């Protein structure tokens, strides 16, 4: 089985793939990165090179697959996205190739879940606010009338009860005995080992129930046309005034204006955000990049630059493990795991 990597990866990851893939799988890698040339290790490769290499490949590993590449890959059976996010794929294009399966990777679910919990705890305990005050010699946060919040035995609503949401649920149930109120599009497909106290589906009443009854809310839904603005002014109005919302999905799943105004007017207590609406266009100069509304001026929101996946220990190799598992399944003629629903767009 032939596999083509469609983006650049660090040399250590290339070596890890080759060491752990069986000899029945041939991995075609882009040229190794020249350390003298400043190129992002996850940048795309010239499409002409990919087209030239793709005529007889069985699997493409990448996050942006063009029409030209799909036409050139005559033997293609599977596309493997090397991480969770799949919004860069053209699902309308993929519908034209019904025999090609597509999977993403859940390898970073634990990393993202840890970051989500960190944001939730920091927001509930007002840690960043107090830290910034004390750096100026200001102890007023010790004496003001805005208290931090209890976590123990509170309720956590999870909008999008997938791999990340289920890990967060286990963490918060174990550590704080939280009541878990979850929403999953297809609740009948829930894993038997999932931890929850309430599980709703696609029905509007289920979402409203979770929003009304949660002290903390985690948004972990994929971004699709259907989930864009899933949480807007109406949904925020249902939340408790002391609610804290954490978003580790994609920015536009929550309406930006509605979220900003709710935080500014203290309609909800706070937020922890790792995903955004505007991103740097130049990785080498990621300065002076702001959102459409001045979240940076608010003291009840924690800002994180979509870096939950950035961990020191083996982050790239954990992702590679997940991809390797799928490649081995495919080489044995078995169904790959974590298949995306092309019709639904995730």
Image (spheres, rainbow, N blue to C red):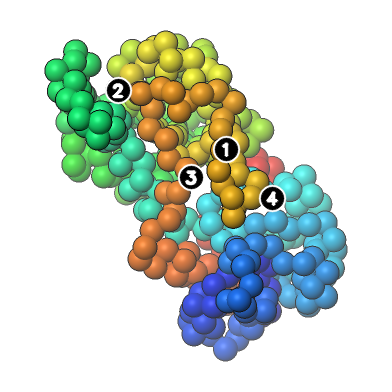
Considering every residue shown, the one lying at the far front of the view is: 137
Q: CA distance from mark 3 to mark 4?
A: 19 Å
Viewer-side label of 3, 2: 3
**Res. 224 image quadrant:** top right
Where, quadrant-wise, is the N terminus in this rendering? bottom right
Circles 3 and 1: CB distance less than 8 Å?
no
Kindly identify the residue that appears in the image at 65 percent across and 62 percent down.
Answer: 43
**Res. 48 image quadrant:** bottom right
Viewer-side label of 3, 1: 1
Kindly identify the residue that appears in the image at 59 percent across and 41 percent down.
Answer: 279
Viewer-side label of 4, 1: 1
Kindly identify the residue that appears in the image at 60 percent across and 59 percent down.
Answer: 81
Name the disc covering residue 306, or none: 3
**286 to 131, vertically: above or below:** below
Q: CA distance from mark 4 to mark 2?
A: 35 Å
- Mark 1 residue crowding within 10 angstroms, few (<14) / some (14–19) / many (20+): few
Q: Secondary structure at mark 4?
A: loop
- Mark 2 residue crowding within 10 angstroms, few (<14) / some (14–19) / many (20+): many
Q: CA distance from mark 2 to mark 1?
A: 31 Å
Residue behind mark 2: 215
Q: Secondary structure at mark 2?
A: loop
Q: Secondary structure at mark 3?
A: loop
The one nearer the camera, 46 or 39, is: 39
Name the disc covering residue 89, or none: 4
Q: CA distance from mark 3 to mark 2?
A: 24 Å
**Res. 277 image quadrant:** top right
């Amino acid at each position: 089985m032939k596999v083509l990597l469609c983006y650049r990866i660090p040399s250590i990851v290339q070596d890890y793939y080759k060491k752990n893939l069986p000899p029945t799988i041939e991995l075609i890698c882009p040229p190794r990165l020249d350390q003298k040339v400043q190129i992002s290790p996850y940048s795309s490769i010239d499409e002409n090179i990919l087209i030239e290499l793709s005529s007889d490949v069985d699997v493409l590993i990448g996050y942006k697959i063009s029409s030209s590449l799909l036409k050139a890959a005559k033997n293609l059976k599977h596309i493997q996205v090397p991480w969770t996010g799949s919004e860069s794929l053209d699902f309308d294009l993929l519908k034209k190739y019904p025999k090609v399966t597509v999977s993403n990777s859940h390898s970073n679910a634990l990393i993202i879940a840890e970051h989500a919990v960190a944001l939730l705890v920091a927001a509930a305990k007002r840690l960043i606010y107090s830290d910034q005050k004390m750096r100026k010699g200001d102890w007023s946060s010790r004496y003001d009338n805005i208290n931090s919040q209890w976590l123990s035995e509170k309720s956590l609503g999870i909008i999008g009860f997938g791999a990340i949401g289920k890990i967060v649920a286990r963490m918060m149930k174990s550590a704080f005995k939280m009541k878990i109120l979850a929403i999953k599009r297809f609740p009948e497909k829930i894993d038997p080992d999932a931890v929850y106290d309430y599980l709703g589906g696609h029905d509007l009443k289920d979402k409203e129930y979770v929003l009304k009854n949660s002290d903390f809310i985690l948004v972990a839904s994929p971004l699709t046309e259907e989930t864009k603005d899933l949480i807007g002014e109406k949904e925020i109005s249902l939340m408790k005034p002391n609610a804290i919302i954490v978003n580790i999905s994609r920015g536009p799943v929550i309406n930006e204006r509605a979220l900003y105004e709710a935080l500014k007017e203290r309609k909800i207590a706070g937020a922890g955000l790792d995903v955004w609406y505007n991103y740097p266009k130049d990785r080498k100069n990621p300065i002076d990049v702001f959102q459409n509304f001045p979240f940076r001026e608010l003291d009840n929101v924690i800002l994180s630059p979509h870096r939950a996946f950035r961990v020191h220990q083996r982050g790239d190799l954990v992702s590679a493990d997940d991809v390797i598992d799928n490649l081995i399944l495919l080489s044995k003629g078995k169904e790959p795991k974590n298949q995306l629903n092309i019709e639904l767009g995730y």
